[in-house]
């Protein structure tokens, strides 16, 4: 690619697309003449990366679909200027099929996500548990080598998941999160066939606790809180006074 494009007199402009930014090699990139726009830094192309909130509102009106439900399924990607960005493939299929479902994640098997979730980096499981509980975690995206093989830290794994769309990323706070219901379902599928039984049990207990709270069952709520205090503690991050959201 370097021989084809770099410093060649026949190249006036090259436009390339792909999931990941240009691979980093050594101290200096061999293709350092590119301006890169990625899921962690969209620069001037934020509104063209995916559907904006205004565009989705218009589509919901046109196809008679509930905007709030559309948001819960496909919103959640957060850029500097545009704070509500929607997955375009899923929105389009939901409008056409007139049904909410996991259209984007159905194009890929959950085994791909499971592979990265199971990587044995210190603190990765704790961070995943916090994400699955609806929380946010701080991520250093600068150490990532822009490929799908060379992982040195948990931040590299999380940064890849941001580029692949499995995690949303707020560049202002430098935090990652699970963006919506569609992606949350994919994480739950990956967890169901992996060594995440304890976390799955905690999340199910969280749903039961919410149900008991809404129905006013005081005894069940008290028992649920007591169990949560004992079970969630192992997933508390070192030096962090809170636990995953239940």
Image (cartoon, grey):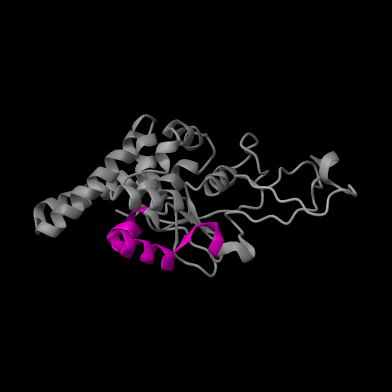
Foreground residue among 184 and 50: 50
Query: In the rendered structure, which segment of residues is drawn in magenta?
Result: 47-73
- In this image, 211 relative to 27: left or right? left
Q: Quadrant of the N terminus?
A: top right
Magenta-drawn stretch contains 59 = yes
Magenta-drawn stretch contains 192 = no
Q: How many marks?
A: 0
Residue beneath the point at 84% across and 50% down: 11
Residue beneath the point at 69% across and 55% down: 36
Measured from the top left, where is residue 183 in percent x and y?
A: 40, 46
Residue beneath the point at 65% across and 46% down: 144
Foreground residue among 204 and 22: 22
- In this image, 34 relative to 192: left or right? right
Magenta region's main secondary structure? helix
Measured from the top left, where is residue 204 in percent x and y?
A: 25, 43
Considering only vertical position in the picture, is 47 above or below 1?
below
Measured from the top left, where is residue 228 in percent x and y?
A: 26, 48
Measured from the top left, where is residue 141 in percent x and y?
A: 61, 52
Residue beneath the point at 49% across and 42% down: 124
Look at the image and tell me whether residue 100 can be seen.
Answer: no
């Amino acid at each position: 690619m370097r021989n084809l494009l770099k410093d060649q007199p026949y190249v006036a402009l090259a436009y390339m697309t792909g999931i990941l930014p240009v691979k980093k090699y050594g101290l200096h990139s061999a293709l350092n003449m590119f301006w890169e726009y990625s899921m962690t830094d969209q620069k001037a192309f934020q509104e063209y990366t995916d559907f904006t909130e205004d565009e989705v509102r218009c589509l919901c009106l046109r196809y008679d679909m509930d905007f709030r439900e559309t948001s819960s399924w496909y919103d959640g990607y957060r850029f500097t200027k545009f704070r509500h960005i929607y997955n375009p493939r899923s929105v389009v299929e939901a409008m056409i099929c007139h049904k909410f479902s996991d259209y984007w994640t159905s194009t890929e098997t959950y085994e791909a996500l499971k592979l990265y979730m199971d990587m044995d980096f210190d603190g990765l499981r704790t961070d995943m548990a916090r994400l699955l509980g609806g929380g946010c975690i701080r991520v250093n995206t600068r150490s990532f080598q822009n490929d799908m093989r060379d992982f040195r830290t948990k931040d590299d794994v999380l940064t890849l998941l941001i580029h692949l769309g499995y995690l949303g990323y707020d560049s202002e706070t430098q935090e990652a999160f699970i963006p919506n219901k569609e992606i949350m379902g994919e994480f739950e599928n990956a967890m169901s066939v992996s060594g995440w039984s304890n976390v799955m049990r905690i999340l199910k207990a969280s749903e039961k606790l919410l149900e008991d709270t809404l129905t006013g069952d005081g005894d069940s709520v008290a028992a649920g809180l007591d169990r949560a205090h004992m079970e969630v503690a192992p997933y508390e991050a070192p030096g962090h006074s809170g636990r995953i959201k239940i």
